[in-house]
Image (tube, grey):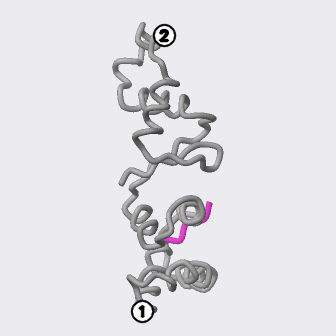
Amino acid sequence: MRNYKTIENYELMKEENKEIFKKYFLNNDKIDDTDIDDIVYCLAFWTYDDCELFEFLINAWYDDALEVFDVIEDHDYMIYDNCNNMGDVAYEVVHECYYDMFKNDSILTRYFDYDAFGRDLEIEGTFFEFNNGYVEIIK
C-alpha cells in the first residue's frame, strides 16, 4: 500500500496522478484549473486504497468528482472487508456497534437475523460491492 506523506513523495505523486485526476475534475464547472493543484496536494496524503475508492465511486455511482473527493477527504465512508453479502455486513455492524451485547455469544446471536438486517441496511443506506467486501457511503 502506497502512502504519500512527504513533500518529495507528493511531487512524485503529483506528476504520476495529476493527469489521471485532471480528467475527473476539469469537466467540473464548480472548480477551475487553479484548484487542481490544491486537490492534488490533498491527494498526496491519500492512501492507495483512497485513490482506488475514488476511481471506483466515480465509475460506479457518482458523477460529481468533487462530491466523491469530499466523501473520501472527510472519511465519510466505511469499508467492510471480506464480506460476501449484506448479511456479512450486518454481522460486522452488529458486532462492532453492539459488542457488549453479543460478546459472550449469547442467545441474541442465535436468534438475530443478520440477512434481514442486511437487507434493511442496503435499503436504507448506500452500499457498494468493493474489493472483496462492501463500502458504505455515510453522507
**Residue placed at 44% from the left, 38% from the top?**
123
What amino acid type is highlighted by mark number 2? Arg
Q: Is residue 79 above or below residue 65?
A: above
4 in the magenta segment:
yes
Using the numbered discs, state the Cα–Cα distance from disc 2 to disc 1 in whole angstroms.
57 Å
Dot 2: element: helix
- Label 2 packing within 10 angstroms: few (<14), some (14-19), many (20+): few
Q: Is residue 76 above or below residue 45?
A: above
**Residue placed at 49% from the left, 31% from the top?**
119
Specify the quadrant that holds the N terminus: bottom right
Q: Which residues are magenta?
A: 1-5
Mark linked to residue 110: 2
How far across and how far down the image is residue 7, in percent?
49, 81
Q: Is residue 122 left or right of residue 17?
A: left
Circle count: 2
Q: Is residue 131 left or right of residue 24?
A: right
Q: Is residue 104 left or right of residue 13?
A: left
How far across and how far down the image is residue 66, in percent?
43, 73
Dot 1: element: helix
Q: Is residue 104 left or right of residue 56?
A: left
User: Magenta region's main secondary structure?
Assistant: loop
Label 2–label 1 contact, CB within 8 A: no
Q: Which residue is mark 1?
A: 34
- Label 1 packing within 10 angstroms: few (<14), some (14-19), many (20+): few
The residue furthest top is 107
How far across and how far down the image is residue 45, in percent?
47, 70
Q: Is residue 71 above or below residue 35?
A: above
Residue 3 shows in the view: yes
Q: Quadrant of residue 74?
A: bottom left
Residue in the foreground of this view, choosing between 116 and 103: 116
